[in-house]
Amino acid sequence: MLAQSAARASIRVVALDHYADADTRSHSVHARAIPLLDEALDPEALIEAASQLAPAHDFPLVYGSGLDSQPELLATLARSREVIGNPPDTQRLFRSPKSFFALLRQCAIPHPETRFERPKNERNWLIKSGCSEGGKRVRFCAQEQAGRDDYYQRQVSGTTCSALFLANGSECRIIGFNTLWTPDAGTRPFLFLGAINHAPLGKLQRQQISDHIEALVKASGIKGLNSLDFMIDDRGEHLVLEVNARPSATMALYDADFADGLLAAHIRACRGELTADGVNAQIRAFRVCFSPDRMISMPAAGWPVWCADLPVAGSVIEPGQPLCTVLAEGQHPIEVKQLLTERMSRLATLLPKPH
């Protein structure tokens, strides 16, 4: 996503990413896959790759998901290098549950009931992490034990949404409101599956959420392209869940609306210039497709044009791992969601046989 946006602005990039998929490689001068260590990017491998492929005096650092949950690693990479994004201290503020919910209370922003001690009645309570990484670490309290950095939050039924915004540390500009999708059932019911750049919000709700974002920007100095996740509960009230203080996946829903892409706007905002001149004319959605079995990825020519984030041909995809992203766009949300469903079904018939 970031590499593709960079290409819109003719920015040459070196991409260091866990997957380093075919799309990333096609938009990068160099791309290297970074292994995981304890479910996070391997610090030693990442630092070595950065020093080899992107020397500090030649390459500023733009980061997405992964580094925001490792502020110490971010601080190491930032030495003698311009960081385009929020600094480690800002990431610590938003990734530490105690500091984040204190900030929400300071700004009078509503959120689900949250505790740091296990509730006596565990029903309808969740265990969350300050670094949930797309909902992977959200669990039911009655079924799991909490870790050192976890917290407890009352489960809220309703619609999960997000707001993508630009900020320069004191001012902000909303790019768009989105509906986020999670599984209807399964072993990981809170896993992020995809999004659509349409949300069931009224004018007052949009204004209230915009006011909350403005308050957070002024209180924290957050800058660049970020997102705020929230719930619309069954009463129509909004409750803030978290802030991703870096470009989020929903950036992909709007990037084509900006002549030089949102990465360029992110860079300008981090340097103090707040611009957002895109005009959204399309409803867009995407859904992550996870591999049902162990398989060998097919060549690029075998994939439909509406698939993105394609694995490198011949690579092994393990069961449950992201396989690709299915895209759809149109004039109406119902039309787009139907098209997305049809394409997901079509893709299932095209996938190679289990290996």
Image (tube, rainbow, N blue to C red):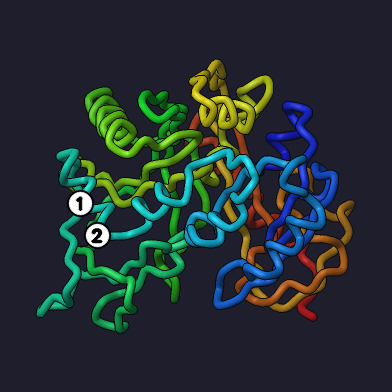
- Residue under numbered circle 2: 98
Give the x, y percent position of residue 198.
44, 34
Q: Nearer the viewer, residue 195 or 68?
A: 68
Give the x, y percent position of residue 34.
71, 65
Name above or below for residue 91 compared with residue 37: above
Name above or below for residue 68 compared with residue 214: below
- Count of numbered marks: 2
- Is residue 158 visible in the rendered image? The answer is yes
Which kind of residue does numbered mark 1 sit on?
Ala
In the rendered image, the quadrant that contains the N terminus is top right
Q: Nearer the viewer, residue 323 or 45?
A: 45
- Crowding near the residue tagged with mark 1, few <14, some 14–19, many ≥20 C-alpha atoms within 10 Å: few
Distance from disc 1 to disc 2, alpha carbons, whole Å, reads 6 Å
Could you say which disc has been placed on residue 102 in the image? Answer: 1
Q: Is residue 19 left or right of residue 158?
A: right
Could you say which disc has been placed on residue 24 in the image? Answer: none
Which kind of residue does numbered mark 2 sit on?
Lys
Give the x, y percent position of residue 326.
65, 49
Contact (Cβ within 8 Å) of mark 1 with mark 2: yes
**Residue at figure coordinates x 26%, y 28% from the top left:** 211
**Residue at figure coordinates x 72%, y 46% from the top left:** 56
Give the x, y percent position of residue 335.
54, 35
**Residue furthest left as drawn:** 120
Q: Quadrant of residue 50?
A: bottom right
